[in-house]
Image (cartoon, rainbow, N blue to C red):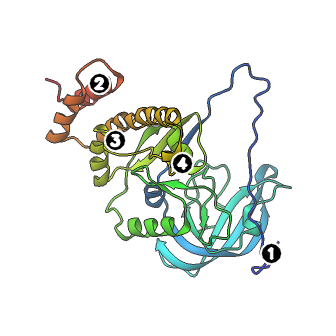
């Protein structure tokens, strides 16, 4: 099946609806966010491109492949190419956003994942940079529906095409000299909701790079502002503002544990001293600081 590259259309949103009616207690739903830096590090090919042909191919077990041919306008990561082939899995009777996507997009792509069942559909073809990625692309035209905002590794939210493209270019301009490890830490639900979506438990994945060490130290000291006061709050009733600020204090305090999780990759005399200051007392944070010090062999 081919489509007219000039046809204007609205991108389809695919939703998964789960019924809890049969459950006496609602199950906990977790969500893990990849920071834009980790998306950039993990992808092997990042391009600005538009879809100009989509075809549907048979797949094993009654499933389908949506094969999209992308016309590349700019290569941010990976070898330069005029065209890129992208595959997405699908089911008969199920529409796919690729079929109506008519925009210049930023694509985060990777090789075919080993965990997927079945053979590689085409040598040299790409898949979303991870197996269950919500969407491998971000439209770069304001008129196009946007999938969702994304986090940077310092827990700031990017929600416009210009922001995401500029930030990706910065990270691609200074690629790491070797494969990166990742770190994951919890973020409060209210923080996750700044992207427009959240689970009951939420985590953020970031690359282990030198910048993470500086961020971890700031988080341990609660120097960052994860939950900024919204505009117009000066007009709130005093009780509402007081309640919001109390909750914001609790949310920002979650930085300490995130910082402890992140700093464990950076053993140094300075960080040992910082963790020893956190290890005093009887708290979850203190226990975690003691655990890291023990792993580092830095317990007195």
At horizontal 64% and vertical 75% (from top left) the residue drawn is: 50
Determine whether 89 is above or below 104 in the image.
above
- The residue carrying pointer 3 sits among few (fewer than 14), some (14 to 19) or many (20 or more) residues within 10 Å by Cα, namely many
* Of marks 3 and 4, the one in the foreground: 4
The Cα atoms of the two marked residues, 2 and 4, are separated by: 29 Å
Label 3 close to label 1 by CB (< 8 Å): no
Indicate which disc residue 262 carries.
Answer: 3
Q: Mark 4 points at which residue?
A: 194
Circle 2 SS class? helix
Q: Judge from the rendering whether residue 68 lies leftward or rightward of residue 35; answer left or right.
A: right
Q: Mark 1 points at which residue?
A: 2
On the image, which quarter does residue 27 sit in? Answer: top right
Circle 3 SS class? helix
Question: Could you tell me residue 240's position as x and y percent?
Answer: 53, 35
Mark sitting earlier along the chain (1/4): 1
Determine whether 295 is above or below 264 in the image.
above
* Of marks 1 and 4, the one in the foreground: 4
Q: Judge from the rendering whether residue 200 lies leftward or rightward of residue 217; answer left or right.
A: right
* Of marks 1 and 2, the one in the foreground: 2
Q: Observer-nearest residue: 245 or 32?
A: 245
Q: Can residue 164 be seen in this view?
A: yes
At horizontal 50% and vertical 48% (from top left) the residue drawn is: 230
Question: Could you tell me residue 155's position as x and y percent?
Answer: 43, 49
Label 3 close to label 4 by CB (< 8 Å): no
The Cα atoms of the two marked residues, 1 and 4, are separated by: 38 Å
Label 1 close to label 2 by CB (< 8 Å): no
* Of marks 2 and 3, the one in the foreground: 2
Circle 1 SS class? loop
The Cα atoms of the two marked residues, 3 and 4, are separated by: 22 Å
The Cα atoms of the two marked residues, 1 and 2, are separated by: 60 Å
Q: Name the residue under label 2.
A: 286
């Amino acid at each position: 099946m081919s489509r007219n590259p000039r046809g204007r259309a609205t991108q389809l949103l695919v939703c998964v609806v789960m019924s809890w009616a049969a459950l006496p207690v609602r199950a906990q739903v977790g969500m893990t966010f990849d920071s834009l830096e980790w998306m950039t590090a993990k992808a092997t090919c990042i391009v600005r491109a538009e879809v100009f042909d989509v075809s549907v191919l048979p797949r094993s077990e009654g499933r389908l492949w949506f094969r999209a041919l992308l016309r590349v306008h700019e290569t941010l990561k990976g070898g330069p190419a005029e065209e890129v082939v992208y595959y997405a899995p699908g089911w008969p009777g199920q529409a796919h956003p690729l079929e109506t996507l008519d925009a210049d997009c930023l694509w985060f792509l990777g090789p075919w994942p080993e965990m997927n069942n079945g053979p590689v559909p085409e040598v040299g073809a790409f898949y979303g940079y991870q197996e269950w990625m919500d969407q491998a692309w971000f439209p770069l035209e304001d008129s196009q529906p946007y999938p969702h905002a994304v986090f940077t590794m310092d827990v700031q939210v990017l929600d416009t095409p210009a922001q995401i493209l500029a930030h990706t270019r910065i990270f691609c301009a200074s690629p790491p000299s070797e494969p990166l490890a990742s770190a994951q830490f919890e973020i409060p639900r209210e923080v996750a909701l700044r992207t427009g979506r959240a689970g009951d438990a939420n985590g953020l994945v970031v690359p282990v790079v030198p910048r993470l060490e500086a961020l971890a130290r700031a988080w341990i000291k609660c120097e960052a502002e994860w939950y900024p006061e919204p505009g117009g709050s000066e007009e709130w009733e005093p009780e509402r503002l007081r309640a919001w600020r109390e909750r914001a204090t609790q949310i920002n305090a979650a930085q300490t544990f995130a910082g402890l999780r992140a700093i464990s990759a950076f053993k140094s005399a300075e960080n040992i001293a910082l963790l020893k200051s956190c290890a005093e007392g009887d708290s979850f944070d203190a226990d975690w600081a003691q655990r890291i010090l023990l792993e580092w062999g830095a317990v007195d």
